[in-house]
Amino acid sequence: METIATSTKEQLLYSLETSIVSSIDHLHPEISASAKETLKALEFPSTRQEEWKYSRTTRISSESWEVRKSSATYDISSFRIKDIDADEIVFINGFFCPDLSTVRNNGAISVLPFSQLDGQLKQQALNNIGSETSRHNSFFTALNTAYCTDGIFFFVQKNTVVHRPIHFLFLQEGERTLAMPRISGIVGSGSKMHIVTSYGSLDQKKAWNNAVIEITIEQNASLTFDKVQLEGDQNFSIINEFFRQHKDSRFSISTLTVDGGWVRNNLNIFLDGTHCESHLNGFYLPRGNQHIDNHTLVDHLLPHCESNELYKGVIYDRGKAVFNGKVFVRPDAQKTNAYQNNANIMMSDDATVNTKPELEIYADDVKCSHGTTTGRFDESALFYLRARGLGEESARKMLSSAFIGEVLNKVDNQFVRMYVQDILTTRGLWV
Amino acid sequence: MAYEGDKILDSVTQKEYEFGFTTNIESDKAPAGLNEDIIRLISEKKREPSWMLEWRLEAFANWKKMTEPSWAHVHYPQPDFQSISYYSAPKSRPKLNSLDELDPEMRKTMNKLGISLEEQKRLSGVAVDFVMDSVSVATSFKGKLAELGIIFCSISEAIREHPELVRKYIGTVVPRTDNFYAALNSSVFTDGSFCYIPKGVRCPMELSTYFRINEGGTGQFERTLLIADEGSYVSYLEGCTAPMRDENQLHAAVVELIAHKDAEIKYSTVQNWYPGNDEGVGGVFNFVTKRGLCEGDRSKISWTQVETGSAITWKYPSCILKGDSSVGEFYSVAVTNKFQQADTGTKMTHIGKNTKSTIISKGISAGKSQNSYRGLVHINKSASHARNFSQCDSLLMTDTCGAHTFPYIEVNNKTACVEHEATTSKIGEDQIFYCLQRGIDMEKAISLIVNGYAKEVLNKLPMEFAVEAQKLLAVSLEGSVG
């Protein structure tokens, strides 16, 4: 067993080593070299590791993957969010596509691919990429650092309100392609911005996306982050996100997993300043044989911070949902207020839910709580609607819409909300 | 108030372990080390039948292939399994007709523990199976229980006298391959209790056993097997104290409960092993595998525990709810102080239909201790209309301790309803203020608040134990607010 695991890891690393040079090398070759060293020491994640207990990676490791730039032209309009008036940055197969993107650099905000960075921006990017926030956190993060296909760095000057949202689109096409895009950014102190990321498949073929997103939120800054996952049944998606918050900053993230064959979201938030505020919301709707895994970490490093987490799931067919929410309260983080809630509804006899809300607390003057529920539909609510003439199916739909609506309504931007609602409606999941 | 609190905290943390004394009784002790010969020696000393020896040797063969578990949230130096003596028995094994024949030294020990047998007999009607250093010395009320057909004796005796029962049930709930410590226990267990309640019998008294680690460097490997046949009821108490020791003592017990159709088992524990001194040196390592099987329909197993001792605790009393409509309960208060580390909780495995489980866990951490709840609720695909409710609260006393919650919830049936909630907070300053204002001093105020906090669990204990448990909470905690 052991030898097979190492050999798959070695095969993967060998094929990547011979086919790609990390785009981070342009900034400093040391970063990827040290990640490669880390990879040598790490095992390919398997269910024997606590972190991967409920998510089988063998389906990834049993395939051979290839990094390949797309040559075909595709219509990506269905992935554009209507009326939002956002700057769009498009990645296909992990490579930045300048032709499809609209990037408006001005004095207040700079958005550049890693390969075009120099001078002061390059220095800032170097401080942020693979910094303590995201360094060698896990096998897949290190894999991205070592063999990053393409990356974008953005920098928001201090005291700037960025009116246009930035929309990052991560799309994939072609059989067995592996994409390893990376977004690295700094939201300057006192600034405010809105980022949307969306993930999709252009041809519904088997693909693997291993993305890293690392963002520093400076003092008193505010970041709203929406994440829309629309990859099809065939996709493997591992999204490693790292957010470091400084004093008085505010951060809110919505993870909306509409679709995805095999999804693992590693969301890490470090509250590295006093009086920070974090909101994490998410819903997941696994159908068919889909497997959706959300691992979140909220690390309270300093006092007087607040975090609030709400994840909801409706599990259909043979779908499998995994939730692992970890709240860390470090010894210094007195007066922490942390709340976590996870609710699941099972729609089918073959559905599975594995949930593990964890609290690790090393300070005493804190208020921390978590709750989780798993069950089926409230039959009395269903009866209420049916007694008023609704068909069973539409009554169920209405109730599940209301259930995940609590999460969707927390999305600030109405265009994002409408976009997701429309997709849910066409898939028969929303009324 | 902080100053006052510190003072009391100091006085409490410096309080020496009350029951820390050693009894000077000569022991018949096996050489240190673990190998097949030692197991043969144990089996021979116990005059066991050959199937038992084979069973032990198979367990040992399994154990050799296993590695120590490392997933628990505890840190400790690994015990050297070859430096432990696996067998020790008081040299003159008294065959007693009355308690007067008991070794006077041992009588003294019992009196210090406050469990003088005749008094127990006379006043509370509790039958005590007293375990001193791995060998049962005195068993009371045997005659009375025998009339009802209840078998209550040491496991070694049961192996000799009732081999058909032991052979049928031992290792069925905790297999020899279950985990590292269960395998170790299976190969070297020296004593423990055995209890069988026949069909339709309601055990008229609380059965109890006292454990005590005595000889320095002797690991205690207890094995308890409790069977409640159809329609029977039994309430079993287990209590522990240990003498003060500087080296770490290993305790790896296995407890197996089997409840048949309509039977009910109530298993209560008050655990007060030596927790180590103020620097965190010494103390007992408590690695226990406790598991109950609700075999029959409508059976019920209820675990209640008050944990105040041990340097390291690693303990998950579990229920396998196999019978339809069976019920599993877990009520726990775990207190850690000084450098104690506890990783404790439960596992509820729902297999049968309409099964129900309740988990109430109250953790209290003080000093520099770490207290973790780790629980699993597993709803099998076959367990339709299963119901679980879990509540895990943690109370923090100082800013140097830690409280952690690791609940695992696995649901494979849509008709299941699983709820879990957990809170962590500091002892309420306003509550303390309220008490102080009304002339209740700091120590009493904290004792009051903690007892109120743990009341839900303490209420589940049998009367005799509830008093002892409250005393223990007071000793372990009073005034230890930071």
Image (spheres, coloured by chain):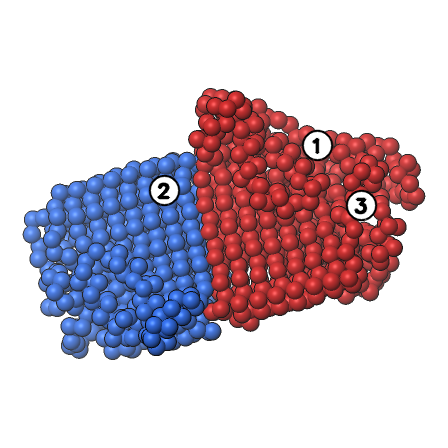
Chain colours: A blue, B red
Q: Is residue A164 left or right of residue A130?
A: left
- Label 3: which secondary element: strand
Percent x, y of residue B139: 84, 46
Q: Quadrant of residue B426?
A: top left
Outermost residue to the front? A388
Q: CA distance from mark 2 to mark 3?
A: 50 Å
Say which chain tag 2 marks: A
The residue depicted at 41 percent of the width and 44 percent of the height is: A368
Q: Which residue is mark 1?
A: B19
Amino acid type at image mark 3: Ala
**Residue B103: image location, x then y, percent:** 87, 35
Residue B169 can be seen in this image: no
Q: Tell me the kind of residue under disc 2.
A: Asn
Is the same chain shared between marks 1 and 2? no
- x and y, in percent, of residue A100 in the image: 12, 68
Are marks 3 and 1 in one subunit? Answer: yes
Q: Measure how far apart labels 1 and 2 are at the Cα level.
A: 41 Å
Q: Is residue B240 above or below residue B320?
A: above
In the image, taking residue B111 as reference, residue A189 lies left or right, namely left
